[in-house]
Amino acid sequence: MLQLAEIFYSIQGEGSWAGTPAVFVRLAGCNLACDFCDTDYSLKFFASVDDVVAQVSSVGADCPMVILTGGEPLAQTETPALVEALRADGRRVHIESNGTIFTELPRDVWLCVSPKERVDPRMAQRADEAKLIVDGRIPEEHFPLFVSKSTVFLQPEGNKPRNVELAIDYVKRYPQRFRLSLQTHKFVGIR
Ligand code: SF4
């Protein structure tokens, strides 16, 4: 059984796919404990893989995009089975991960890695998108992991003005390599 926090239909607010409708499947639990984490990923209910696929259909109808997030979605052993079942149901699967747990993923799965502390280099290599959180400083220690990526997002933690200022300044200084990612869903009060 999968451990879940919530399943809901909303809009992806961040990164490359900002503005795209998506069903969010928030898996419960995380293998890290970041100071700034404001996500409630506590366990709310259990569900089988088939139940999750059915709930995705129920809330999102024919929405193509499903985002597996957390917590850390790759911390659960049944997540690869969920990925397969969603793909078989015709969904485009995205995963938002901290990149610490190596997992083989089909090529058509979009992987966003947002490093917090340690990262498995294979996950950094596999990432379709790197999203680095700016929390009082630019996390330059993670840059070497993503040298092969054409674009790295800098995302101000909590949309706080100081973090926004730092991120904008850095992106403007290195426009070939960095882009700003804002949590746009928070501007309009949606999850
Ligand atoms: S990795 Fe993400 S979900 Fe886990 S504690 Fe850190 S910020 Fe929160």
Image (spheres, helix red, strand yellow):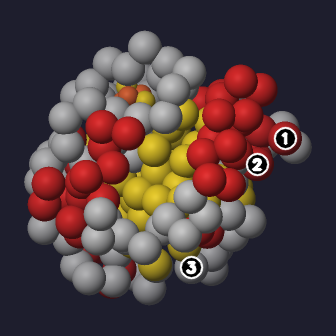
Asked if the residue at tag 3 contacts the one at tag 2, i.e. Cβ–Cβ closer than 8 Å, the answer is no
Please tell me the numbered disc located at residue 12: none
Instruction: Identify the residue shown where x is 76% and y is 48%.
Output: 184
Asked if the residue at tag 3 contacts the one at tag 1, i.e. Cβ–Cβ closer than 8 Å, the answer is no
Residue 174 in view in this figure? yes
Residue type (three-letter) at the residue carrying disc 3: Pro
Please tell me the numbered disc located at residue 184: 2
> If the picture is divided into quarters, which one holds ligand 1?
top left
* Residue with the mark numbered 1: 187
Toward the front, the furthest residue is: 173
| Mark 2 or 3, nearer chain start | 3
* Residue with the mark numbered 3: 64
Ligand 1 within 8 A of label 3's CB? no
| Mark 1 or 3, nearer chain start | 3
Quarter of the view holding residue 94: bottom left
Residue type (three-letter) at the residue carrying disc 2: Thr
